[in-house]
Image (cartoon, rainbow, N blue to C red):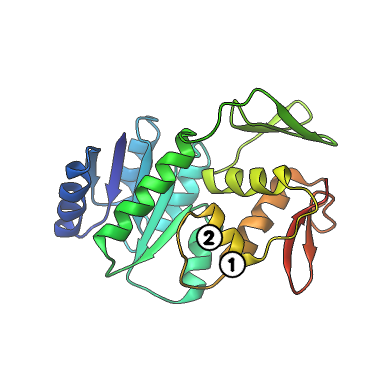
């Protein structure tokens, strides 16, 4: 697996690179957002670790540009801890978010979890599709289509939709969705789930303001109508 680490703190890049290479990953480091976008276009990377505050273009802008052509898993890093900053990161298309200073063991765990989901490893090989209305989720190919059009989803968006579609009419709280989909005990604002649901609705619903697939159980959580 090849990982791109992007941060203007060269010592931090060096430290992350050392620790991830020790786990067997191939790691490349760069120091500004523009370089990150250009390298991401190669499609060579399985995951990107992207700092928010950087020269040239910041991490949020870089993340949005990368999302225009790639669904590679992205972990955002920032020195800020405000919930609004986290929500902005997810809204730009990030799959995960860590606040500096962070525990390197936790970073390794999140990298492993994201790569596992993105590659489909650990997933049972399935040939069947789940189809509801115009929406089809192909579990074998790991893709989603609306009619004949493929819907471009991030790894987290796909995992969230798959969970909901596999268990129609079952209501999931935000906390449960974070723990199941993100794969670790999440400490923070569960509104990040709301951001991902909103992005999913924008991609799969005919009218996101009046969704027909992902519905809200007020005061409880979300469910797939089925």
Residue contact at pointers 2 and 1, CB within 8 angstroms: yes
Secondary structure under the numbered disc 2 in the rendered image? helix
User: Residue 175 has which mark?
Assistant: 1
Q: Quadrant of residue 146?
A: top right
Camera-side residue of 109 and 68: 109
From this viewpoint, which residue is outermost toward the top? Answer: 127
Q: Name the quadrant containing residue 46.
A: top left
- Residue 36: where, in percent of width, then height? 33, 44
Position in image of residue 91 (x %, y %): 56, 59
Question: Quick one: SS at disc 1?
Answer: helix
Q: Residue 179 carries which label?
A: 2
Q: Is residue 110 left or right of residue 189?
A: left
Res. 52 in view? no
Q: Residue at x 65, y 43 (%)?
A: 162
Residue at x 57%, y 69% (from the top left corner): 190
Which quadrant would the N terminus be assigned to in this image? top left
Q: Quadrant of the C terminus?
A: top right
Q: Nearer the viewer, residue 163 or 198?
A: 163
Q: In this image, 78 relative to 193: left or right? A: left
Where residue 159 appears, x then y in whole percent? Answer: 58, 45
Number of numbered discs on residues:
2
Q: Position of residue 78 (x, y in %)?
A: 35, 66
**Local crowd size for mark 1, using a 10 Å CA cut-off: few (<14), some (14–19), many (≥20):** some
Question: Can the viewer see residue 26?
Answer: yes
Q: Residue at point 15% right, 52% down? A: 14
């Amino acid at each position: 697996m090849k990982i791109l680490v992007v941060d203007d703190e060269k010592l931090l890049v060096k430290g992350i690179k050392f620790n991830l290479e020790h786990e067997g990953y191939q790691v490349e480091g760069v120091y500004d957002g523009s370089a990150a976008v250009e390298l991401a276009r190669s499609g060579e990377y399985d995951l990107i670790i992207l700092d928010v505050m950087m020269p040239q273009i910041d991490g949020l802008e870089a993340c949005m540009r990368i999302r225009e052509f790639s669904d590679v898993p992205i972990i955002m890093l920032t020195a800020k801890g405000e919930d609004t900053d986290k929500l902005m990161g997810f809204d730009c298309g990030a799959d995960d978010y860590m606040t500096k200073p962070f525990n390197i063991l936790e970073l390794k765990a999140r990298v492993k979890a994201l790569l596992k989901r993105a590659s489909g490893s650990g997933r049972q090989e399935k040939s069947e599709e789940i189809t509801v209305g115009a929406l089809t989720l192909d579990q074998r190919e790991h893709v989603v289509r609306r009619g004949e059009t493929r819907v471009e989803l991030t790894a987290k968006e796909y995992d969230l939709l798959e969970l909901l579609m596999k268990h129609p009419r079952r209501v999931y709280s935000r906390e449960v969705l974070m723990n199941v989909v993100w794969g670790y005990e999440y400490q923070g604002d569960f509104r990040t789930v709301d951001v991902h649901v909103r992005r999913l609705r924008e991609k799969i619903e005919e009218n996101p303001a009046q969704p027909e697939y992902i519905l809200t159980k007020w005061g409880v959580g979300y469910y797939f109508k089925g």
